[in-house]
């Protein structure tokens, strides 16, 4: 009996050792085999914070206003991408940025630009104005992405931006060209000004009444995401923000156009002093924004 019990005990120990060895071997083998279970789904919503330095310019839509050089502006953004799949999503958020630009035109103004005491004399001036318009914009875009290629994902986006003007200012230089005088018979004549005593150089003015409160733009962008760790990525891109409608407000235009922005003739912008004709300024504002930030 003892011999049989010892034999059964040895068999049980051998069976236990074989099972333990097989289990350990299978556990090690799974480390080298691919997993055929459910893969982790990408995040449905990704949010980000970005800085947006930009180059902006005004593009006149009338034939009288002259466009100036582009200007450098700055902004920032919060973004939210809602993913429908790994490769496309709906993008929105909040952009807070400055744009604007330089424009030049001829104005008829009442009052000496350099003397508030003289508020009755009329002048014809050349006005060079550098607009700085600040917008809060809600982008509504579709964003297409590639799959990750060596830690890098390439993306493009297209859509609309709806903006609200929260402040508009400008720095302007005024060159007085003509001063209105009364002849002996009481008729008005224009005196050519050869000196700069009536000029104003680099003055800051509030232009909220000259810029529309709403703005619509087309948004077109390209860029890359560099995966840093997990769902955190460094984002770099460039976006063309193209204004669609005139941003110059009609509140800046009076009933008598001849008292405001004046038409000129020819490339030399000659003024017909005997027949002053006014017009309404019309311009759109564009910007190329560089986007640098993080997605989480």
Image: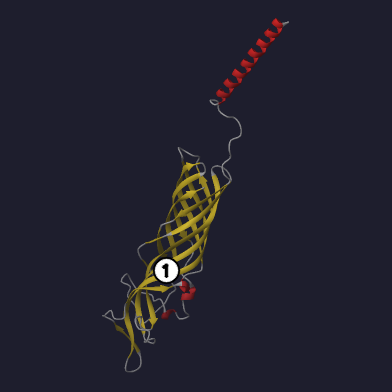
For image coordinates 69% across by 9% down, the residue present is: 8
Pick whichever, 166 or 112, lies toward us.
166
**215 with respect to 116 (left or right):** right
Q: Position of residue 181 (x, y in %)?
A: 33, 88
Count the numbered circles shown: 1
In the depicted structure, whether residue 208 falls above or below residue 42: below
* Frontmost residue, 235 versus 232: 232
Q: Residues within 10 Å of mark 1 (few under 14, many from 20)?
A: few
Q: Is residue 182 left or right of residue 213?
A: left
Q: Residue at x 48, y 71 (%)?
A: 249
Between 182 and 70, the residue placed more toward the observer is 70
Q: Position of residue 76 (x, y in %)?
A: 46, 57
- The relative height of residue 140 versus residue 151 in the rendered view (above or below) is below
Residue 75 x/y as whole percent: 44, 59
Q: How is the image coloured?
A: secondary structure
Quarter of image, res 31: top right
**Residue 148 makes an appearance in the image:** yes
Q: Is residue 73 left or right of residue 17?
A: left
Q: Quadrant of the N terminus?
A: top right
Q: Is residue 51 above or below residue 124?
A: above
Q: Position of residue 194 (x, y in %)?
A: 26, 80
- Would residue 64 be seen by someone viewing this image from the given angle? no
Left or right, residue 205 beside residue 78: left
Residue found at the very far right of the displayed protein: 1
- Residue drawn at point x = 47 percent, y = 74 percent: 209
The residue positioned farthest toward the bottom in the image shown? 185
Q: Secondary structure at mark 1?
A: loop
Q: Which residue is mark 1?
A: 62
Relative depth, front residue between 7 and 186? 7
State the residue lying farthest toward the left. 194
């Amino acid at each position: 009996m003892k011999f049989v019990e010892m034999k059964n005990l040895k068999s049980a120990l051998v069976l236990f050792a074989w099972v333990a060895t097989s289990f350990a071997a299978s556990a090690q083998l799974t480390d080298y085999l691919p997993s055929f279970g459910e893969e982790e789904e990408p995040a449905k919503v990704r949010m980000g914070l970005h800085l947006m330095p930009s180059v902006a310019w005004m593009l006149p839509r009338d034939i009288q206003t002259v466009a100036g050089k582009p200007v450098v502006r700055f902004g920032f953004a919060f973004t939210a991408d809602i993913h429908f799949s790994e490769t496309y999503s709906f993008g929105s958020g909040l952009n807070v940025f400055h744009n604007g630009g330089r424009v030049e035109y001829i104005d008829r103004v009442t009052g000496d630009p350099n003397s508030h005491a003289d508020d009755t004399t009329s002048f014809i001036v050349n006005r060079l104005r550098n607009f700085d318009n600040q917008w809060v914009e809600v982008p509504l875009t579709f964003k297409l992405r590639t799959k990750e290629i060596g830690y890098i994902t390439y993306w493009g986006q297209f859509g609309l931006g709806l903006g609200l003007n929260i402040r508009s200012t400008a720095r302007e230089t005024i060159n007085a060209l003509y001063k209105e005088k009364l002849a002996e018979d009481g008729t008005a004549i224009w005196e050519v000004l050869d000196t700069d005593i009536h000029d104003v150089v680099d003055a800051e003015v509030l232009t909220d009444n000259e810029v529309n409160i709403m703005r619509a733009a087309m948004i077109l962008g390209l860029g890359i995401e560099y995966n840093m760790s997990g769902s955190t990525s460094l984002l770099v891109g460039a976006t063309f923000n193209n204004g669609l409608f005139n941003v110059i407000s009609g509140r800046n235009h009076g009933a008598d156009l001849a008292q405001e922005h004046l038409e000129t003739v020819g490339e030399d912008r000659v003024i017909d002093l005997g027949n002053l004709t006014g017009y309404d300024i019309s311009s759109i504002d564009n910007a190329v924004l560089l986007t640098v930030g993080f997605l989480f």
